[in-house]
Image (cartoon, coloured by chain):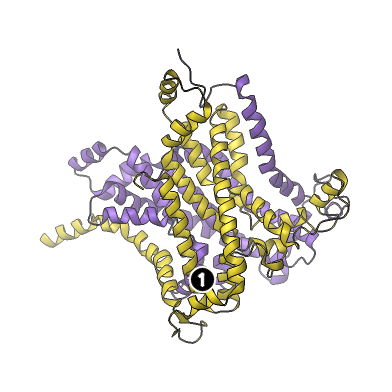
């Protein structure tokens, strides 16, 4: 009888509710991060056992890896600083405008604006390749030649000067995702009496309303949106290669740290080195998120 | 009465809104154009794919590109129906499993008291920023060693931990499942499982739907399982099959036609589901803030 009760009690334990997720979390999220940290101090080619090499990988990355230092780091920072904040601000202003049109038409606009984020830029790469194709059969070149008086077709995807900007536009196009929806829902749920009170107090300017009422009211959604947009910028892994048609893009244009890690891991099988790059990348993600929490977090 | 300059959620069109409509119209056009392009491109016959000057809209729509996608399989020995079956099976399992796992954990994190609850909540909010792509290499090394190689689990297990899923359900539960209701049920002798199933779950349906949509999105387009953790052709899924067909077309113009058809197959189910469920998604996103 006593034992029976014990089983019943164990069956109701909160930990039982948590257990499935916790197991998967450890397996898929925590363990890989841990493995990356450990392997980053080793030399490992996936076949032989890893050999401890201390800080060698990190030293090599920061002293000898010119591709990493000259291209991957600057591209990643430039890319995330442009796509992150611009996409984020776009999302906010679109949400702000959408909130001010009637429900039916708003739904139509919102579905159209959200839908590119479903597909994602990398999946779309071959369609972009035909749009930006380097001869006059390319849609963009055809348009430029016929309507804007450009003389000869531009090698959009083989020219480092064009590839990176195209990559940014393509990523922005696909970045109105969950964060955008969260901000829209947030704005629609702001207590309207706040605005009426402000109007009585003499607030007339829309910018004042945005900065003193709208943004503070949806701060939690703004933070969620910021985190989502930081994650979103990593969806550009492999985008430059896909746009350029496989292999290393010309002059490493658009070559990101993620691409560098995958290159060392999956093509060269230097897992230790790739893990060290991964750890650096994780630290950068952490840094960006810290900034987002500083800006929008309530306790930050 | 003093009126605010802002009129959120207006009931009908008003002439003050024209600037918003103008701007949103242009943005929608820009965002929608590539999708209209794919739709047109997917139905273009050969002659129009190769046409010079290139035409944006399709003149004589055909199913040539879709047929090319479907019939390619006769050469590899496995029919496209097998890949479709695999994709549907895997996606259904991923959706159901994600919902169960996420909602159970969210219920505990929102409504039950236990040691370590605060820490776990912090960890989950923290892991929202987790980017699977960033740890692709160590993830591969872990997953290759847990016995999912060449099984259906290869497509399923890696997708099941979804921090944003737990987060959305938990947030929704915090505001929409009143504590009094749970206390009342407890007094009536209901256990945690019964409260979870009969009270909490029915009240958080919008969040569940949102998580289901996210799980569908991830699983339906997932190629990682097929390319990294499976080398039996019969176990691979539709996106992988389509990417193989696309990459073997040889010619960039033909590739784009077949690719657009494949893209459409990936995209349309997502779009339809979202359109029908967008009310629920918006209700759930309203509670999505990180506090």
- Rendering coords of residue B4 (x, y %): 48, 21
* Residue beneath the point at 60% across and 76% down: A267
Residue plotted at (64% across, 29% down): B21
Q: What is the drawing colour of chain A?
A: yellow
In this rendering, position of residue A168 left or right of residue B41: left
In the figure, A186 relative to B126: above or below?
above
Answer with the quarter of the image where residue A136 lies.
Answer: bottom right
The purple-tinted chain is: B
Question: In the figure, A109 relative to B159: above or below?
Answer: above
Where's residue B91, x and y in %?
Answer: 52, 57
Residue furthest top as drawn = B1
Tell me if B33 is positioned left or right of B170 in this view: right
Q: Say which of B188 and A139 sits in front.
A: A139
Residue A126 at x, y = what percent? 71, 58
The answer to whether residue B182 shows anywhere in this view is yes
Nearer the observer, B20 or A160: A160
* Side (left or right) of B144 relative to A11: right
Residue at image coords 69%, 54%? A166
B169, B92: nearer the viewer: B169
Q: Chain of mark 1?
A: A
From the viewer's perspective, tell me whether residue A153 is left or right of residue A60: right
The image quadrant where one finds the N terminus of chain B is top left
Callout 1: SS: helix
């Amino acid at each position: 009888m006593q034992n029976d009760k014990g089983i019943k009690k164990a069956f109701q334990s909160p930990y039982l509710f948590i257990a499935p997720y916790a197991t998967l979390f450890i397996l898929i999220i925590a363990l890989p991060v841990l493995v990356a940290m450990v392997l980053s101090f080793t030399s490992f080619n996936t076949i032989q056992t890893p050999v401890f090499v201390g800080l060698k990988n990190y030293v090599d990355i920061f002293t000898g890896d010119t591709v990493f230092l000259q291209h991957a780091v600057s591209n990643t920072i430039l890319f995330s600083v442009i796509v992150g904040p611009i996409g984020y601000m776009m999302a906010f202003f679109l949400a702000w405008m959408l909130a001010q049109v009637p429900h039916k038409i708003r739904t139509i606009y919102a579905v159209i604006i959200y839908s590119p984020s479903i597909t994602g830029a990398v999946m779309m790469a071959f369609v972009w390749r035909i749009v930006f194709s380097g001869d006059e059969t390319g849609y963009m070149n055809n348009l430029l030649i016929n309507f804007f008086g450009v003389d000869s077709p531009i090698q959009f995807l083989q020219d480092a000067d064009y590839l990176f900007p195209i990559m940014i536009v393509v990523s922005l196009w696909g970045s109105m995702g969950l964060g955008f929806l969260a901000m829209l829902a947030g704005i629609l749920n702001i207590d309207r009496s706040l605005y009426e009170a402000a109007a009585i107090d003499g607030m007339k300017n829309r910018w004042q309303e945005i900065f003193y009422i709208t943004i503070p009211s949806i701060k939690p959604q703004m933070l969620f949106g910021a985190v989502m947009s930081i994650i979103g910028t990593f969806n550009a892994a492999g985008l430059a290669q896909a746009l350029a048609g496989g292999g290393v893009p010309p002059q490493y244009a658009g070559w990101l740290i993620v691409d560098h890690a995958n290159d060392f891991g999956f093509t060269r099988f230097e897992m230790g080195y790739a893990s060290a790059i991964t750890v650096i990348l994780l630290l950068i993600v952490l840094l960006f998120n810290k900034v987002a929490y500083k800006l929008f977090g309530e306790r930050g | 009465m003093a009126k605010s300059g802002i009129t959120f959620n207006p009931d009908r069109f008003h002439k003050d809104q024209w600037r918003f409509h103008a701007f949103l119209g242009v943005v929608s056009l820009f965002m929608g154009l590539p999708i209209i392009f794919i739709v047109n491109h997917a139905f273009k016959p050969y002659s129009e794919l190769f046409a010079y000057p290139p035409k944006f809209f399709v003149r004589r729509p055909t199913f040539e590109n879709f047929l090319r996608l479907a019939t390619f399989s006769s050469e590899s020995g496995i029919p496209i129906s097998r890949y479709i079956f695999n994709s549907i099976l895997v996606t259904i399992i991923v959706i159901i499993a994600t919902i169960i796992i996420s909602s159970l954990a969210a219920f505990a994190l929102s409504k039950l008291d236990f040691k370590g609850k605060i820490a776990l909540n912090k960890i989950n909010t923290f892991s929202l920023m987790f980017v699977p792509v960033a740890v692709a290499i160590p993830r591969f090394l872990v997953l290759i060693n847990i016995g999912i190689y060449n099984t259906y689990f290869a497509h399923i297990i890696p997708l099941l931990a979804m921090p944003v899923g737990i987060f959305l359900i938990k947030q929704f539960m915090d505001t929409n499942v009143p504590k009094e209701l749970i206390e009342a049920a407890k007094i009536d002798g209901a256990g945690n499982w019964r409260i979870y199933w009969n009270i909490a779950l029915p009240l958080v349906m919008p969040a569940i739907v949102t998580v289901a949509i996210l799980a569908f999105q991830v699983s339906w387009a997932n190629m990682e399982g097929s390319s990294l953790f499976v080398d039996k052709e019969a176990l691979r899924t539709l996106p992988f099959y389509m990417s193989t067909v696309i990459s073997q077309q040889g010619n960039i113009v033909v590739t784009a036609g077949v690719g657009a058809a494949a893209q459409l197959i990936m995209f349309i189910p997502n779009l339809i589901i979202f359109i029908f469920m967008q009310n629920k998604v918006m209700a759930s996103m309203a509670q999505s803030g990180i506090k």
